[in-house]
Structure formats: structure tokens, C-alpha cells
Amino acid sequence: MATIKKSILNKLYIVTALMTLFFLVIVVRIINIQYVQGDEYRKQSKKQTIKYDTIFSNRGNVYAADGNLLATSMYKYTIRMDLVAVKSAVFEKNVTALSRSLSGLLGKPTSYYQQLLRNARKRKNRYLLIARNLGYNDYMKIKQFPIFKLGPYKGGFITEQKTVRVKPIGKIAERTIGYDDYRGGAGIEGAFAAYLEGENGWRLKQKIAKGQWKPINDVNEKEPINGKDVITTIDVNFQDITHHALLRQMEYFEAEHGCAIVMETATGEIKAIANLGRTSNGKYYEKRNYAVWESHEPGSTFKLASLMAAIDDKVIDTATVVDTEKGILWLHGSKVEDSHRGGYGKISAARVFEVSSNVGIVKLIRKHYDKNPLKFISKMKAFGLDKKLGLQIKGEGTPFIPYPGNKRNPWNKISLEWMAWGYGVSMTPLQMLTFYNAVANDGRMIKPRFVKELRVQNKTEKVFERVILKERIASQETIKKIRKVMENVVKKGTADNIYSPYFSMAGKTGTAKKWVDKTTDKEGNVIKGHYSNQLYVASFAGFFPADKPKYSCIVVIHEPNKKKGYYGATVAAPVFKEIAQKIYTTTPFDVQQVTDNPPVETIDKNYQAYYKKLQKETKAVPDVKGMSGMDAVSLLENLGMRVKFEGAGKVEKQSIRKGASFKKGDVILLKLM
């Protein structure tokens, strides 16, 4: 018996010792977790349940020269609800009133919201989605609804704020206005990204059920600082005119792509720039910035540089006679041919330009520069045709002027002659326009400008002054003669189809065959690179009015349907005329003053008036007559209306009268003039 008792006691001692040891291990572990590693574990716990959520700042606005918004950031709000946070008595007393308010704002029946809220409360949903992408006005309204007005802790009101980038004028000039996002940085938005970006803020969020995150506080821990504003040179009215004139012509001729640019002669400001590319279903949109990026063989518009070089070097005059024979010239096995069958016979150099005789210009340049081509090439460089312009935006194409010894494009027996009529050289439309603009500007070459100034909270921080690239590209005598023959191109030359007795224009048509690189056909046969007889580039470059040029303009259209037409006079020149005519008739040329100072007072006035209306006009249709179209669209859409508009400029008429009541989603039609 004693032996059994002793055995039991020994076992008890062992168990007690083990339990004591186990207890001591637990105590040591607790002390270690609580005091030694406590801070680290608390950090990990906090990291897993609480996070800093970035609140992205609003980018600065991009404005047109007249104060219209081209790009802006807007707040959008997502509203959620924590049903657990609301006391039962408060919920039962106010759920019907809340449902009725939500129905009035969001459109669905009261019964829908009442059932939604009750079911969510039964499931103890702490993150119920109420609405997405609300505008600021709707956000301020919903914030005052029953239950919600009690705030996040008592009313379960949860707000998530984000910003979206919008372009009030839609797709017009989209590639030039640009973007700075996952696609990269393009246009004005990309070039001035560092300036437009603000400073991000942040707020604390706590992890709740189902891996969702809920804001801890109703206010931000650090408020975001919005970016700064960019004032461009774009005129919205000019842009609308240019875009639609180009679009109509491209649709008719079923062209592959094209562009049109309007530049203010004295300042180099780009007043309008349209770039349209064709989709597979025949629609057009701003596909690429062809005007800035695409360097191509210009064809006959380059004859301006050839004729001007010879006149400025005094080897010919406008009256110099050249025999174009029967319109065909063979050079080392290659044919130069005029579009006019039978040629023009003996004509003056001025007439060569007016009728765009390929044989005539080639003969003139060959005679005087064949033995010294570097003299001709040096003139092209003096005109600034061999270098980039150094634009304010990215993506400028590289121009190319051939020269003896060049490894990229070896000089040959016909390089000079081909250059004379616009082949073997390469330029972007904007580079070509800058050259034409210099002729319009009495020989002074101005750098194209897209941005006038940078602003911070309505104060000018930096003004971009006019930059003169070359003070004089040719003598005044040469410029005077060249401008006269350019005017005659419209009066009695290849562009006489756009002549108008009511306002004067000057310019040059261009028609160039496109080079097709080496390809392999379906049978595996190799087709050598060649100039196509089916694919053409039609262009027209010039200025208006001819006597006192205010604006220069270029139109370039690639691959029009040959069956409908492909000459520059037929395809591109009418676009130039429409742009010039509409600008001429809507702009008081005789009283206009050229200034580098943007109308900041007008912008401020419009900006303040817009937001004043936005805050006041929330229950009835506001009077938007006289407002800029884009501000009116933004105002009405923020009120919940769907807006359709016709024309461009300021609002002349609205389909729903001022003061009339409306429902969310009602359509209003604006007529702009």
C-alpha cells in the first residue's frame, strides 16, 4: 500500500513540476510578447488593420486663350453606409425618410431603398454601397439626408472621394491637350505634368469585415493641394471651325488621316490644331498628333523654298523664263512630269509656281545649282528647314534635308532635282507651316507656341514670350515677290477654285505620291520600295488676308480616295478656304490687336460667375444664356441634366426655360454661337 502511495505521489510531483514549468514558459512568453516584442507586434497589428489611404490632389486646369476650360479635374464621390453604427431607435424612426430622400436624388423607388437598408441591417453590413460617382452638389445634398447627417459614427455615413480628368470640349484637340496617365505623357498635359500636379493628401482607414476598408475620421488627416493652371493659345471657336472643316472633307474623300493647323502670324500662337485618323469602321477621331509628329515628303508645297532660294540668291527673278516643253523631263532614267498634259511651254518663274510646274522648278534649280548643290542646301538651312523647332510639347518629328556625304540617304545624281519639287526631303506639317508663317511675317520666323502662361491661384507665375527663331530668312525684296506669286496661286493658279472676291488668301497647293516600303505579296514575291500611283498626300499651306496676314494655316490629308480626287487643290485647299472664311467673318480684323498678354481678367470673371451659378442654381433650370458653351455644359451636368449642344462659342438659346423644374436625367439642348 505504502509503495503504491509513494508511486502516486512521485507521479503527482512530476506532473506538478511539468505544469509549473509550462506555466513559467507561458509567463515568460507573455512577458516577451507584451514588453520585449510588444511594440513590434502592435505595429504589425496596426499595419494589418489600419492604413494610410492616399487622397490624390486635383491637377491644375488647362484653359483656352478665351477662358474656356479644355481640361479639368472633378471630384466624384462614392457613398456607403455602416448599418451597425446606427442605433435601432434612430434607424426605425428615420429609415422611411432616408429612403424617400434617396429615391428623389437617385431615381429608384422608395420601397427599393427601404428594402435595401433593412436587409443590409439584418446582415450587419458595415459597408453598404449607396451611390457611385456623385458630383459635388449631390454629395452636399446626400450628406444632409436623415440618418446620414448624424455623421460617420452615429449615422454610418461613409464617403470615398476621387478625382477624374474631364475635357469639357470632348474629343476636339484631344491629342494636343494630351494626357498624363498609364498611356504616358502627351501634349500639353504631358509636357506640363510637373506643374499641373499638386501635392497628395491622406486619410486613415480601418479594415472591417470582408476585407473592406472604412475611413476612421470624417475629415482628411492631410488635405491635398491642387495643381496649378495652364493657359493655352487655343481659341475654342477657331478649333471648332478647323476640326469640323477637316472632318467633313476627310469623310467625303474617305481619307486615311490628316491634320489642319491655324497659327497667329505675328506671335506664333497655335490658335487651332486638328488631327484626325480613320478607324476600321470609317469613323474619325484624334488618333495621333500628326501635325507635330509625322515627318513626310511634302511635295509641291516645298517649291516655295526652292523658288525663294533662287530669287534670294539672285540667280533668277519672277520674270525669268523657263521652257517646260511638253511637261515631261527625263533625268538619268527618272521622269519628272507636270499634271497638265502637254506642258505649259515657255513661262515665267512666277507662273511656274502659280501652276505648280514640276518640270519648270526642276529646270530652274538644276540650271543654277547642279554644279554647287551645297549652295542650295545652305539656303534650306538658312530657312531653318533642317532643324526641329523645339516645341513646348513632346513628340516633334525630325526634318530631313539631304546633302552630299550623308550616310542615311546617300546623295545621287537626281537628289537636287528631286528636292526642288518636294521629294527626298521630309518635314512635319507644323515645321512647314512655320516656314510659310515666316513669309507671311515679312521674313521673321517665330517659334510655334501652345502655352501662353502658367498661373497659381489666379496669379500669373510665368508668361511665355514670343521666341524669334530667325530675324530674317530672306530679303524684304524676295519676301515681297514671293507673297505676290502666292496670292496669284489663289487668283489664277492651281488654287483658283478657292478664290473669293470678298477676302484675300495666298498659298500653295501640294500633291505628293506616297512612298511604299518593300513588301512581300500573298504569293511570296518581293515588291521593291516605290512611289505609289494610288496613295497620295494632298496639302495646302498659306495665309490670310494676303495683304496683311493675320493667320497662317496648313491642311494635310493623307490617302484620299483617288476616285473622288487627290490633288491638293481639290482635297486640301477647300478646307483652308472654309477655315479662313469662317475666321475672317467672325473676327474683326481691322480692330484686332496682337498681344502676348492673356485675358486673365476675363478668365477670372467667367470662373467666378460659373461657380456662383453652380452654388445657387440647384432646384430649377438656370439661365445659361451668354455663358461659354463648355461652362454651361459642366454646370448643367453637375445639376444632373443630360446636355446636348449644337455649334460653338457662347450659349444663344436653351431648350428648357430658366426657372423650370426638372428631373435628374432630363435632356436640355443648347444652341451655341
Image (cartoon, rainbow, N blue to C red):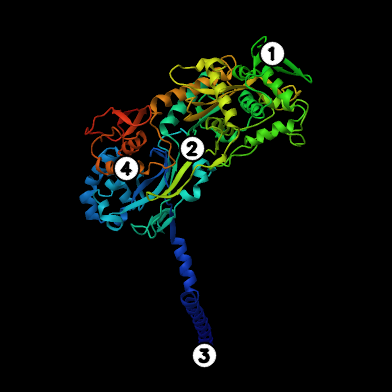
**Secondary structure under the numbered disc 3 in the rendered image:** helix
Between marks 2 and 3 in the image, the one whose residue lies nearer the viewer: 2
Q: Mark 2 points at which residue?
A: 267
* Mark identifier at residue 2: 3
Between marks 3 and 1 in the image, the one whose residue lies nearer the viewer: 1
Mark 1 belongs to which amino acid?
Answer: Gly
Q: Which of marks 2 and 1 is nearer the N terminus?
A: 2
- Identity of the residue drawn at 50% across and 50% down: 194
Mark 3 belongs to which amino acid?
Answer: Ala
**Residue 58 percent coordinates (x, y):** 41, 49
**Secondary structure under the numbered disc 4 in the rendered image:** helix
Q: Do the residues labelled 1 and 4 touch (CB within 8 Å)?
A: no
Mark 4 belongs to which amino acid?
Answer: Lys
Q: Earlier in the sequence, mark 2 or mark 3?
A: 3
Left or right: where does residue 108 sit relative to residue 442?
left
Q: Name the residue under label 4.
A: 605
Q: Do the residues labelled 2 and 3 touch (CB within 8 Å)?
A: no
**Secondary structure under the numbered disc 1 in the rendered image:** loop
The CA distance from mark 1 to mark 4 is 61 Å
Between marks 4 and 3 in the image, the one whose residue lies nearer the viewer: 4
Q: Are marks 4 and 3 in contact (CB under 8 Å)?
A: no
Q: Hey, which residue is sitting farthest top in the picture?
A: 342
**Residue 533 percent coordinates (x, y):** 67, 18
**Residue 143 percent coordinates (x, y):** 28, 49
Q: Name the residue under label 1.
A: 327
**Depth order, front residue of 182/204:** 182
**Depth order, front residue of 119/245:** 245
